[in-house]
Amino acid sequence: MQNWMRALAAHYEYARQRFPDDRLLLLFDIDGTILDMRYTVQHLLKTYDSQYGTAHFRQLQLTDIDFHEDDILEGLRALGVPPAEHRSIVAWYCRHRWSNWALFEAHRPFPGVLEVIRWFQVQPGTFVGLNTGRPESTRAETLASLNRLGREFRVAFSSELLRMNRRGPDVPIADVKGAGVGSYREAGFRVICVVDNEPENLQRIAEIDPGREILLLHASTLFRCRRGQVPGRAVDGKVYDLTQLIPRRALPRHIQFVWSGAGDSMEGFLQSNVYWADLGEVPPDGLCGILTRLKQQGRGARIALGADRGATDRTLAAVRDAGLEARSLWFTAALQDLKSDGFRSLARSFHGAIIECPIDFLAPLILSAPEQAEAILDTFTEWGINRFALDRDLADLRTVLDSIEACGFDFTICGVAGLERFLQCVLLMPRAIVADFRFPQWECEEQEGAALQSA
């Protein structure tokens, strides 16, 4: 069975090559595709219990909700709610389903979906639109709630890229979705992908796309129609997996990638296309030889400096002996180790090199008093520091990065382990990422590619 994220990556690459100057558009349904509607159903039913003093849903778990959010009566029967209560619960549910508090408090995205959307939003000439059967009257609340969820992932949705149901509840949603695709086309977009959990909606899109330019992705979550109605050309899936979506060759070129622990895996590093080798604190006696080899291979070195001033002096002497250009040198050191004088001296001696310090300790101040934190960072730049490093596992990392970036500072994300976390960091678009690039998934892809070439 074809992986739907791989299918999406391949189709997008094909469309970009075939239509290089077009505005490519990927369309996502909202309920059941971006949002896991089980949370909404659970929240609404538990709120009913709270308001009316009942206990029908006190023990209700997400795993108990295996019915569509529109089929609430069927769900009540499955949950064993007394029939005498059905009418009042259904009426209350329908009355509050699109209320402000339900839209803001009960929505949860499927894991990974906002990262997938972010990936396409940062691609040139590419847009992500929404095509939903929600009533037009909920436009403002829908955008506000989705943008609140998306803020953490740097995802933003606009009214211009949102098509809703203006025709009323009696019009089939499939017709609404088809009209939405037509509206986007009329606005000058080339629709290349539609992601929806309802098979009949995808079937309608297939009918208006005889040229098969649109990739149909079926989010196999909870849906009302029979699975047999899924178009034969559609690709099923339910896991939004970045590791299947983003190949190594698609990584942004403006991010500086640093191979963590390259000193212990030099051969693997030199066989890669990663420019920067993270050497850590290398004993000065062996450093010159390593740097000479990196210079011969046209690579750069990230070198950690410690508190021992004598060792630092010997390390810098070895760096000078190796003769690397300043643009191929990257020094990182803690503030308490080099202090003001040490950083100033480093900046004078290696003008043009990257000079970095970690600032995890400043994160609480950045969040609580950003102007005061900016003044401190400005002082550090006066010492010659031109890059700030943050750990991947830092709490509120995205919010901290937003503040640093807004002030115009470059930052590095360090301590990245595993391909999924690495790709999540890529989506934050930092200036640099330090990671162990020995990702098994990519190694398998390279082996598969080599096998195909030799076949």
Image (cartoon, helix red, strand yellow):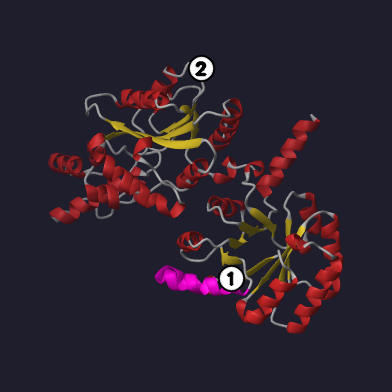
Where does the magenta region start and end? 362-383
Residue depicted at x 17% and y 41%: 95
- The label shown at residue 36 is none
From the image, which quarter does the N terminus lie in? top right
Q: Nearer the viewer, mark 1 or mark 2?
A: 1
Q: Nearer the viewer, residue 105 or 60?
A: 105
SS of the residue at dot 1? Answer: helix
375 over 274 or under it: above or below: below
Q: Residues within 10 Å of mark 2 (few under 14, many from 20)?
A: few
Any magenta on residue 372?
Answer: yes
452 over 43 or under it: above or below: above
Tell me: 65 left or right of 434. left
Residue depicted at x 15% and y 54%: 51
| Location of mark 1 (residue) | 381
Residue depicted at x 34% and y 41%: 66
Residue 284 position in % (x across, y down): 82, 75
